[in-house]
């Protein structure tokens, strides 16, 4: 009778308690079922569930196909990653419309995001400075590096928890920062990060969710 907030896919509905006479009280309680998730392929028990809900509610992802699927296990491209990060940042307008990358055309869903990322040093190209490679699959090492550049995080310890992250790699400092801040717990085994493995869409939004919640 006294609804405070409707159920979501992560929280039950909240109601005010009432006394025996039926009058509304001040205490609240949760009751009922969770609302079904809009994405039919998102496992309610998946490690990425809350991250996908957050990304959807904040306009970071609009899903795939007709908007009823998310495709969590699909490979994420560099275009996807930079667009998710740009949306999470609030879709800031770049100061210049001069594109530094010859393989990014005007009018693509990621064009403005790439302009913004380039201006802010989040991406410096792929291999050479005038190539962004939007359709190349994003690796776990790349996404952590982009997140680190955006947030400007620094690890306070030099202890490396992962046996497959070498000190002379471009992602070394970023991975140490991510591990220290709970953004990554490793890949399968707790002592590996798998920096060169394909980063899935589920992993991308999960990294984003953890990183941005740590720096609110």
Image: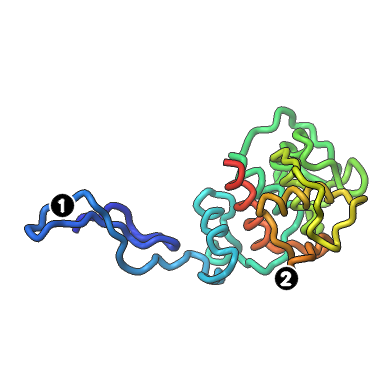
Q: Identify the residue under disc 1.
A: 24
Label 1 crowd bin: few (<14), some (14–19), many (20+), radius 10 Å:
some
Left or right of 59? Residue 205 is right
Quarter placement of the N terminus? bottom left
Which is nearer the N-term, disc 1 or disc 2? 1
Mark 2 falls on what kind of element?
loop
Dots 1, 2 in contact, CB < 8 A: no
Label number found at residue 188: 2
Q: Which of 14 and 98 is in front in this view?
A: 14
Q: Nearer the viewer, residue 60 or 103?
A: 60
Mark 1 falls on what kind of element?
strand
- Residue 32 position, x and y percent, is 31, 68
Left or right of 27? Residue 210 is right
**Residue 160, located in which quarter of the rendered image?**
bottom right
- Residue 215 position, x and y percent, is 61, 42
- Residue 188 position, x and y percent, is 73, 70
Residue 135, above or below 42: above
Quarter placement of the C terminus? top right
Label number found at residue 144: none
Label 2 crowd bin: few (<14), some (14–19), many (20+), radius 10 Å:
few
Q: Which residue is drawn at 78% across and 48% down?
A: 174
């Amino acid at each position: 009778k006294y609804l405070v907030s409707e159920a979501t896919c992560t929280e039950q509905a909240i109601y005010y308690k009432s006394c025996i006479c039926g009058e509304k009280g001040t205490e609240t309680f949760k009751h009922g079922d969770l609302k079904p998730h809009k994405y039919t392929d998102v496992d309610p028990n998946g490690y990425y569930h809350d991250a996908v809900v957050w990304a959807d509610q904040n306009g970071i992802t609009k899903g795939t196909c007709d908007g009823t699927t998310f495709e969590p296990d699909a490979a994420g491209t560099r275009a996807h990653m930079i667009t998710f990060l740009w949306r999470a940042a609030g879709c800031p307008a770049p100061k210049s419309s001069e594109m530094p990358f010859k393989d990014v055309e005007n009018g693509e869903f990621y064009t403005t995001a790439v302009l913004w990322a380039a201006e802010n040093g989040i991406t410096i190209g792929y291999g050479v400075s005038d190539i962004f490679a939007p359709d190349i699959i994003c690796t776990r090492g790349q996404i952590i590096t982009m997140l680190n550049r955006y947030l400007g995080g620094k690890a306070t310890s030099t202890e490396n928890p992962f046996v497959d992250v070498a000190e002379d790699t471009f992602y070394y400092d970023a991975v140490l920062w991510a591990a220290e801040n709970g953004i990554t717990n490793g890949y399968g085994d707790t002592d590996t990060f798998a920096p060169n493995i394909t980063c899935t869409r589920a992993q991308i939004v999960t990294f984003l969710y953890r990183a941005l919640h740590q720096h609110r």
